[in-house]
Image (spheres, coloured by chain):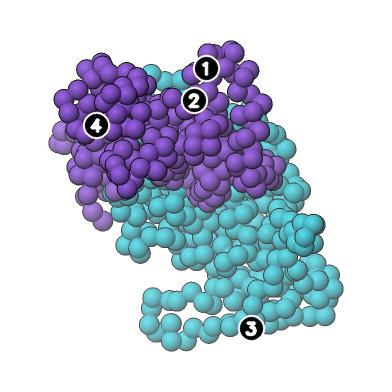
Chain colours: A cyan, B purple
């Protein structure tokens, strides 16, 4: 797919999202949590970019910052060539229909006091002047699209199962015909049997509506199934970004290797030989990241330079990007 | 998965679209099922009905001093007897109910509106949180009775001159009670708003591009209805009792102007001789407060879709 260059839909350049920490009687700022610390990547039109990493590495924050649900501390965000990193108010509001989000917890992301019909109609109310009948028709059409029974429009979210609730969330995200959807761990809160249904639905919709996904997950096998390219995050930075096959077959970064070694293999024979790389210690606090490479405290192949200098995020051919001193010498 | 999850893209056929239920229809059905609320409703409307239309049937002037019939017991002309000045107790209770209910409901509404606005703004807008909550603390720290004294002394005559003696005092009392009792509501509402605005459905509304004012009206307010209902029902009781305290101190309505609170406090001196003089208006206050509480309870349940239908 990299042979034919594609249109860039979303461009993220040096995105930083820092949250201040206040303490003491005077509530002075004593530090910052560097949740996202310099992300640079592009998302092509029609692709699915998987974003993986362990809990607390800044995946969700990155997704929300890209949608401008937060005001980024630094960096540039572009969607369809338009800089959205600093726009505010109505200009931002008018761009909302282009980019939508599917949330992790299908229970929490639906207002318990609104009916399914009015939840799905909310984006239509906000952005499109429609008559009551047109709106109703569109809501029912959306419910068909995500495989919800039309009869359920008058019901409340608590009457549904997790998978159905997630479908409601997906229908709401689709209401305005977005181009770009951030899926923030949309399957993490679901049963395994239902995960497959929701993932298939997402694939189906992508095919029919030409959607572009940023798929945030910590489920490596699911990302392998769904994504065209995969970015691996560690402590607020992307350590490796590569097309799916390249990343899963030939990981370049030691952290990616360790992550992939933790994925169980369904074949018992190969599973028996699987060598796990077990990382020692905990993830450092994003309020106080180590000097040099963020991964230097746990890296099995750590060198002296890693503790002093931050490795640059470089391109190593065939769309394979990584940030590691090991690769720079080679 | 359960029914209703069908392969994407296939229109669901063969199912007749159910008649969409109206929200208020559902609320009414649930409310009717709440026995306490229905009894409360019945009692409350009976009291309101009696108080509104009673004086038209029982046409004795509540302030008329019938010396020859003073301290009389139950009779046809005075169904609940007369007090030590010969005033008809029943007429006084009816007339007093008008004032007490009007003061209670209006002051409660005022306190509720002020409290909810302050609470929502403080909870939702971070930069307003500090100033508004310090203002709330300030009001909570004010000594209530001295404040009432000062306010009444300052404004009684102006308001009387502007609106007439009774309306003027009514506005003064309602204003004073409302302005000094919104703080609890504001604090409770702020706490709930703080918790709610971090919920994902508010974030989802933001990602849709819903402006803050509609996030408040569509997502925040409906979800803080329960605490508001509770403070409303408590607020009525509180206002009726505060009014009686103020009148008791001689700062409220004039002495010959009956209210439930005043009847209780005036007649408590005779509790050994004629207990019914104080007990009847006291029972009226309790019944009102209790029935309003039950109505509030039923409304809260009926407005919550998670409880509705059980």
Q: Which element carries disc 2, helix, strand or loop?
A: loop
N-term-proximal mark, 1 vs 4: 4
Identity of the residue drawn at 64% across and 45% down: B143
Q: Which element carries disc 1, helix, strand or loop?
A: helix
Q: Is residue B110 above or below residue B63?
A: below
| Visible residue check, residue B115 | no
Q: Would residue B105 be found to the left or right of residue B78 on screen?
A: right
Q: Which mark is residue A280?
A: 3
Label 4 and label 3: CA atoms lie apart by: 93 Å
Is the residue under label 2 in contact with that under label 1 (CB below 8 Å)? yes
Single out the mark in the foreground, 1 or 3: 1
Is the residue under label 3 in contact with that under label 1 (CB below 8 Å)? no
Chain of the residue under the numbered disc 1 shown in the image: B
Label 4 and label 2: CA atoms lie apart by: 25 Å
Residue linked to disc 1: B165
Single out the mark in the foreground, 4 or 3: 4
Chain of the residue under the numbered disc 2 shown in the image: B
Q: How many marks?
A: 4
Residue linked to disc 2: B254
Label 3 and label 2: CA atoms lie apart by: 81 Å
| Visible residue check, residue A269 | yes
Is the residue under label 2 in contact with that under label 3 (CB below 8 Å)? no
* Location of residue B40 in the rendering, given as x and y in whole percent from the top left corner: 25, 39
Q: Nearer the viewer, residue A109 or A199?
A: A109
Farthest residue to the front: give it. Answer: B68
């Amino acid at each position: 797919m990299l042979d034919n260059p594609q249109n860039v839909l979303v461009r993220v350049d040096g995105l930083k999202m820092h949250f201040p920490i206040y303490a003491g009687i005077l509530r002075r700022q004593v530090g910052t949590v560097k949740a996202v610390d310099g992300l640079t990547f592009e998302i092509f039109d029609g692709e699915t970019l998987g974003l993986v990493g362990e809990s607390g590495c800044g995946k969700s924050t990155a997704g929300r910052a890209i949608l401008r649900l937060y005001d980024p501390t630094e960096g540039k965000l572009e969607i369809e060539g338009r800089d959205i990193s600093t726009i505010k108010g109505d200009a931002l509001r008018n761009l909302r229909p282009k980019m939508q989000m599917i949330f992790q917890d299908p229970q929490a992301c639906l207002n318990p006091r609104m009916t399914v019909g009015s939840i799905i109609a909310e984006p239509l109310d906000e952005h499109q002047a429609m008559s009551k009948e047109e709106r109703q028709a569109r809501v029912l059409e959306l419910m068909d699209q995500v495989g919800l029974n039309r009869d359920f429009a008058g019901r409340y979210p608590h009457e549904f199962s997790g998978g159905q609730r997630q479908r409601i969330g997906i229908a709401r995200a689709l209401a305005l015909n977005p181009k770009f959807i951030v899926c923030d761990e949309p399957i993490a809160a679901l049963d395994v049997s239902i995960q497959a249904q929701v993932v298939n639905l997402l694939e189906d919709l992508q095919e029919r509506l030409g959607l572009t996904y940023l798929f945030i997950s910590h489920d490596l096998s699911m990302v392998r199934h769904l994504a065209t390219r995969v970015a691996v995050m560690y402590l607020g930075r992307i350590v490796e970004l590569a097309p799916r096959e390249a990343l899963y077959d030939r990981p370049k970064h030691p952290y990616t290797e360790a992550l992939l070694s933790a994925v169980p293999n369904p074949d018992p024979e190969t599973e028996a030989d699987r060598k796990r790389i077990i990382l020692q210690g905990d993830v450092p606090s994003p309020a106080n990241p180590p000097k040099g490479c963020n991964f230097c405290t746990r890296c099995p192949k750590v060198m002296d330079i890693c503790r002093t200098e931050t490795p640059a995020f470089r391109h190593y051919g065939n769309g394979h990007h990584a940030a590691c001193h090991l690769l720079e010498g080679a | 998965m359960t029914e209703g999850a069908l392969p994407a893209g296939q229109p669901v056929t063969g199912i007749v679209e159910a008649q969409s239920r109206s929200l208020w229809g559902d609320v009414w059905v649930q409310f009717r099922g709440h026995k306490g609320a229905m009894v409360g409703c019945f009692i409350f409307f009976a009291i309101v009905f009696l108080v509104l239309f009673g004086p038209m049937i029982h046409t004795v002037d509540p302030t008329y001093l019938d010396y020859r019939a003073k301290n009389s017991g139950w009779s046809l002309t005075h169904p609940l007897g007369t007090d030590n000045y010969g005033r008809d107790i029943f007429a006084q209770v009816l007339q007093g109910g008008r004032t007490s209910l009007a003061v209670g409901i209006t002051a409660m509404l005022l306190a509720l509106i002020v409290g909810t606005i302050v609470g929502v703004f403080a909870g939702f807008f971070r930069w307003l949180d500090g100033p508004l909550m310090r203002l709330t603390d300030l009001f909570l720290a004010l000594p209530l009775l001295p404040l009432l004294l000062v306010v009444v002394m300052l404004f009684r005559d102006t308001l009387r001159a502007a609106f007439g003696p009774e309306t003027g005092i009514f506005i003064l009392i309602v204003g004073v009670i409302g302005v000094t009792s919104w703080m609890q509501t504001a604090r409770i509402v702020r706490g709930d708003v703080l918790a709610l605005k971090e919920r994902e459905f508010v974030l989802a509304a933001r990602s849709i591009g819903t402006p803050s004012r509609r996030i408040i009206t569509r997502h925040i307010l409906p979800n803080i209805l329960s605490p508001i209902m509770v403070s409303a029902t408590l607020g009525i009781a509180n206002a009726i009792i505060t009014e009686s305290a103020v009148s008791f101190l001689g700062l409220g309505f004039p002495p010959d102007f009956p209210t439930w609170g005043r009847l209780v406090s005036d007649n408590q001196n005779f509790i050994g001789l004629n207990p019914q003089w104080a007990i009847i208006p006291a029972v009226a206050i309790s019944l009102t407060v209790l029935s309003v509480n039950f109505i509030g309870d039923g409304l809260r349940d009926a407005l919550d879709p998670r409880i509705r239908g059980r």
